[in-house]
Amino acid sequence: MTGPRLLTIILNFRTADMTLQSAQAALREMQGIDGGIVIVDNDSGDGSFEAIQSELMRPEWPADRIEVVASGHNGGFGAGNNFGVRHGMAQQDYDYVYILNSDAFPDPGSIRALMQHLQANPKTGLAGSYIHGPDGDPHLTAFRFPSLWGELEGAARVGVVSKMLEKHIVPLPIPAETTPVDWLAGASMMIRREVLEQIGLFDETFFLYFEETDLCLRAARAGWATDYVRTSEVTHIGSVSTGMKTWTRMPRYWFDSRLYFFRQNHGGLYAGTATLAHLAGGLIWRLRRLIGGKPRRDPDWFLWDLVKHYCKFSLKPTKRERTSIPDFPISAEPASGGEIP
């Protein structure tokens, strides 16, 4: 095979069977494409690594195209994918990196469509797929960057507020055709090597959530576009590893990631104002519920947890330079992330 080389990373956390199904679909869609797949077991601790390793020894799996490695530490989504990129790039050079969720299954032509789009658009640094559920319903995966007004609108969820702040609503209407967006969900995302060389890999301070938002923002500030490629379709189950669908209360790492994103990218004052905007929107929504009998939508104690978290961590000084983004070329060592700076 000749042409651009593609490195596909699939991050596993206690979903061995599903991860193998995802890898099988990716292998099928990589036929005729030069490249390989690295499955990263993110310290599952449930026998996932051994189960995947044993399965990949079967003759139907091409040993020269796919392997499983153990991260040895669950540092989250970004750190796990970074581990896979570091491992893959240490073996040979690749032109593109494709991040694929373990509960996502590329439909026919999907991977090739992303690669062809990046080849045809040299100013595009990242490309993502149209994502739909097993029932065919489309998922919201194209977004504007979070902002003060976006925080207010997203928490208020009242028609008149949404109409006034239409240009700031974070989730975009599902695009009917290929189009530039601010950021994409990381379930199916292809990244040009040159982007990673310029801005580095995922920021490993994020354990989960906002890491792809941050990556796309850093890419945009460096002059790279992010495109939603409608012709690339991927089936996605969603929230299998995180258990998000069963949450009754938001975990601390979501609040950590949100606060870190705003502080690191916009400063402490902006982060505080964004929290106040979200609080104001949340109070508007609760008033609307009281008046109109609307159903409850937020997890238990959400506004209380948001304010308490901000008050606890807002006085912690913000570092001027990050130390949690691995450089490219890639070091064999992980970055020194893991705490809110």
Image (tube, grey):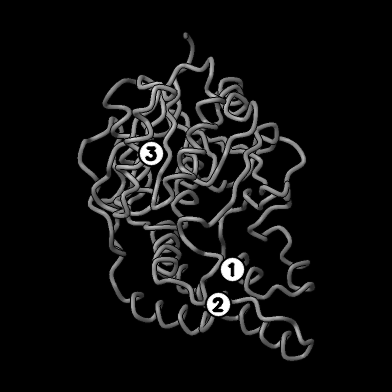
Residue drawn at the location 71% of the way across and 65% of the way down = 165
Secondary element under disc 3, as helix, strand or loop, is helix
Marks 3 and 2 close (CB-CB < 8 Å): no
* Nearer the observer, 101 or 146: 101
Q: CA distance from mark 2 to mark 1?
A: 17 Å
Label whose residue precedes the other's in the sequence (2 or 1): 1
Q: Which x, y percent locates residue 225? A: 56, 36
Q: Nearer the viewer, residue 220 or 128?
A: 128
Residue 16: image x %, image y %? 42, 46
- Residue tagged 1: 151
Residue beneath disc 3: 199
SS for tag 2? loop
Q: Position of residue 203 (x, y in %)?
A: 35, 49
Residue tagged 2: 299
Residue situated furthest bottom in the rendering: 290
Is residue 73 among what the camera can see?
yes
**150 left or right of 71?**
right
Pick whichever, 52 or 176, lies toward us. Answer: 52
Q: Nearer the viewer, mark 3 or mark 2?
A: 2
Q: What's the residue at 59%, 24% (across, down)?
A: 112
Q: The residue under label 3 is which amino acid type?
A: Ile
Is residue 321 visible in this depiction of the protein? no
Q: Which SS class for mark 1?
A: helix
